[in-house]
């Protein structure tokens, strides 16, 4: 059978929420509520007052916030989170009870802070909130005893048969003499019946309230054995004020040898009293708080934690100045963190071809935002500041307008026989001058011309001679060699027609060559048409300095720059005399004066006079 809360076998009594054995929850009062006030100022704000004698205390934040709960006694002593110092979660003694301070993991939990205590409290306590952000709501609840309710402190010392809920339990069969003794005892102690438990004589152990008149003890007898202190228990702590108790053993009074405890009277065994020990403070240590939430939901972020210098004394951990922890390496207060990999930009294709064949156009490529699982997601999930360009300008070079040429090379490609000389020919945009130049068209100037250094001596078979010098001293050129079909005879060689060797693979007779970069060189266009046909006109051409890759350069020698303008048609204007152009009338001078030469009849009849006047007017306009 089970034992009830009244210590009787087979009893089904249990302690109710008021702490009363066999009670019906009516002997106490539950006080609860929610503090939802809107606060504006930062700092400590009082939430609720916990009265003396309160039990089952529960102070809980509705959900997680950056605020903190704090607890202080009415005397002004800080119990938890006082003086702007945040304590670690744990157990803290205050108000005659032990409070459990909980602060769930800041990353994985959404629950708020809480204070829990069984009570009862022996003084008034005040609960505060350190306000830093909007109040999420604070739920509070505690139980206080009703009127004429036994103090919960005395319940722990109650024995079977002691008064319960302020009433003395008298078992059946108790005679009236016991009742009279009960009344006499209450009168003797100066207390009214029911104010605190009264123990009936001879029925229970020797527990008595402090104001109870002690019973008369019988005279001490001379015994052979007695109790002796032989030492103390080990201190509960190595520093910071612990506790220890004396150890009593039964010994022979004469020899002081230890004997079994049954030899001594157990009722005379001294009750061990607590003694303080190791009063010196413990070394300070770094108290490491929980890491805060990561500053970023993906990618590399930062998290913080609180590091306090703490020191333990009298079973209480106190926050002290940081210099006391200077003998220890301080842990890091910040750290990098990464909850998951962010989505990132990926370039899916290469650049397309330029949109124009010449000049400035655009080209594109495919850029997508891809999650850490490889899925294409919206661009907003990636950092737009880091997005690679998916379109850019491209320069395909100037569009063609004019042919630009270099001078002919000085060397012939063949040391003997027929060879070639070369020059560079480039079609480029005319964007410098306003000369009357036309588009490049299909009439590309030749870049090779024939040359000869005299006849070559006789050669041998399909016979290939040595390569000639490169046609240019720098840049791209060509090399030539003689390839002939010969027949070897005794002591001689006969040269045959090439078709005789057509069944054989003919060696190449020309190849490209490149000695070194030329650097910048002068290029020029063809001369324009002369501005006048006689009496001195001029013609022009455009000259540019181009590098090896045919881009404009400034590295050409200015002294070698070809002329851009030169005179032309410097001969005098002499009219051509036509033998058939004669005056048919003697008075053609009158026709000229009358300005009749504009008519076909007079222009023919007075041909010489009209032609002479026309040439004279053309020369006058040319000089203008």
Image (cartoon, rainbow, N blue to C red):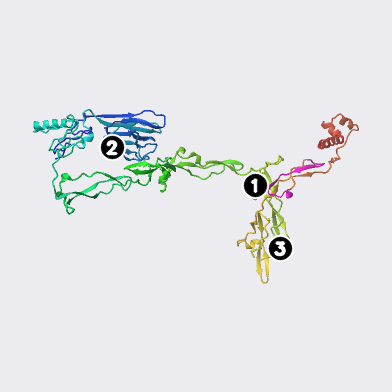
- Examine the structure image and report whether residue 623 is included in the region drawn in magenta: no
Q: Which residues are magenta?
A: 532-561
Mark linked to residue 97: 2
Left or right: residue 123 compared with residue 496? left
Q: Which mark is residue 589?
A: none
Q: Is residue 168 visible?
A: no
Say which quarter of the image contains residue 194.
top left
Residue 13 in picture, x, y percent from top left? 17, 35
Helix, strand or loop status at disc 2: strand
Percent across and percent down for residue 98 are 29, 38
Q: Residue at x 38, y 28 (%)?
A: 38
Mark 1 lies on a secondary structure that is loop
**Residue at left offset 16%, top offset 32%:** 188
Q: Between marks 3 and 1, how big is the CA–CA gap?
A: 41 Å
Which sits in the foreground, 175 or 215? Answer: 215
Q: Position of residue 56 (x, y in %)?
A: 27, 34
Query: What residue did someone put label 1 on?
Result: 551
Alpha-carbon span between mark 1 and mark 2: 91 Å
Judge depth for marks 2 and 3 and give the one in front: 2
Task: Find disc 3 in the rendering and name its residue.
Answer: 456
* 111 over 425 or under it: above or below: above
Q: Is residue 516 visible?
A: yes
Residue situated furthest right in the rendering? 586
Local crowd size for mark 3, using a 10 Å CA cut-off: few (<14), some (14–19), many (≥20):
few
Q: Is label 3 or label 1 in front? A: 1
């Amino acid at each position: 059978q089970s034992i009830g809360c009244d210590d009787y076998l087979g009893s089904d009594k249990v302690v109710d929420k008021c702490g009363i054995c066999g009670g019906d929850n009516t002997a106490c009062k539950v006080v609860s509520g929610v503090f939802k006030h809107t606060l504006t100022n930062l700092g400590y704000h009082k939430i609720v007052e916990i009265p003396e004698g309160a039990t089952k205390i529960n102070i809980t934040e509705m959900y997680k916030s950056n605020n903190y709960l704090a607890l202080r006694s009415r005397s002004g002593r800080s119990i938890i989170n006082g003086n702007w110092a945040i304590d670690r979660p744990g157990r803290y003694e205050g108000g005659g009870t032990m409070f459990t301070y909980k602060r769930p993991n800041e990353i994985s939990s959404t629950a708020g802070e809480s204070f829990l205590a069984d009570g009862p409290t022996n003084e008034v306590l005040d609960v505060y909130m350190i306000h830093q952000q909007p109040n999420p709501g604070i739920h509070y609840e505690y139980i206080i005893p009703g009127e004429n309710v036994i103090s919960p402190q005395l319940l722990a010392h109650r024995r079977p048969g002691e008064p319960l809920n302020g009433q003395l339990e008298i078992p059946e069969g108790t005679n009236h003499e016991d009742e009279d003794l009960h009344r006499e005892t209450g009168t003797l102690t100066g207390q009214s019946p029911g104010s605190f438990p009264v123990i009936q004589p001879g029925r229970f152990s020797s527990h008595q309230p402090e104001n109870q008149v002690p019973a008369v003890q019988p005279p001490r007898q001379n015994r052979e054995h007695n109790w002796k202190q032989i030492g103390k228990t080990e201190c509960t702590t190595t520093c910071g004020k612990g506790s220890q108790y004396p150890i009593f053993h039964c010994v022979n009074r004469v020899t002081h040898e230890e004997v079994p405890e049954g030899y001594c009277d157990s009722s005379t065994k001294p009750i061990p009293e607590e003694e303080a020990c190791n009063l010196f403070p413990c070394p300070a240590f770094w108290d490491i708080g929980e890491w805060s939430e990561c500053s970023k939901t993906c990618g590399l972020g930062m998290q913080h934690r609180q590091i306090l210098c703490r020191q333990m004394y009298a079973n209480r951990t106190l926050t002290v100045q940081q210099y006391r922890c200077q003998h220890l390496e301080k842990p890091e207060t910040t750290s990098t963190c990464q909850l998951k990999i962010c989505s990132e930009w990926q370039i899916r294709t290469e650049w397309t071809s330029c949109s124009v064949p010449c000049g400035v156009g655009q080209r594109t490529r495919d850029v997508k935002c891809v999650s850490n699982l490889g899925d294409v997601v919206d661009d907003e999930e990636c950092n737009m500041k880091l997005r690679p360009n998916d379109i850019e300008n491209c320069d395909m070079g100037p569009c063609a307008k004019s042919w630009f040429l270099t001078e002919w090379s000085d060397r012939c490609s063949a040391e003997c026989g027929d060879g070639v000389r070369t020059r560079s020919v480039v079609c480029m945009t005319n964007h410098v001058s306003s000369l009357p130049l036309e588009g490049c068209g299909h009439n590309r100037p030749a870049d090779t011309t024939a040359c000869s250094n005299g006849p070559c001596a006789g050669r041998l078979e399909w016979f290939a001679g040595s390569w000639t010098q490169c046609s240019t001293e720098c840049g791209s050129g060509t090399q030539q060699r003689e390839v002939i079909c010969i027949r070897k005879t005794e002591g001689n060689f006969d040269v045959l027609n090439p078709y005789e060797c057509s069944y054989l693979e003919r060696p190449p007779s020309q190849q490209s060559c490149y000695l070194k970069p030329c650097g910048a060189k002068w290029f020029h266009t063809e001369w324009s048409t002369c501005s006048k046909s006689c009496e001195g006109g001029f013609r022009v051409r455009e000259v540019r300095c181009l590098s090896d890759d045919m881009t404009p350069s400034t590295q050409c020698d200015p002294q070698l720059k070809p002329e851009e303008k030169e005179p032309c048609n410097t001969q005098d204007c002499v009219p051509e005399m036509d033998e058939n152009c004669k005056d048919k009338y003697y008075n053609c001078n009158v026709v000229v004066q009358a300005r009749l030469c504009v008519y076909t009849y007079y222009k023919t009849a007075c041909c010489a006079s009209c032609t002479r006047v026309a040439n004279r007017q053309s020369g006058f306009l040319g000089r203008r």
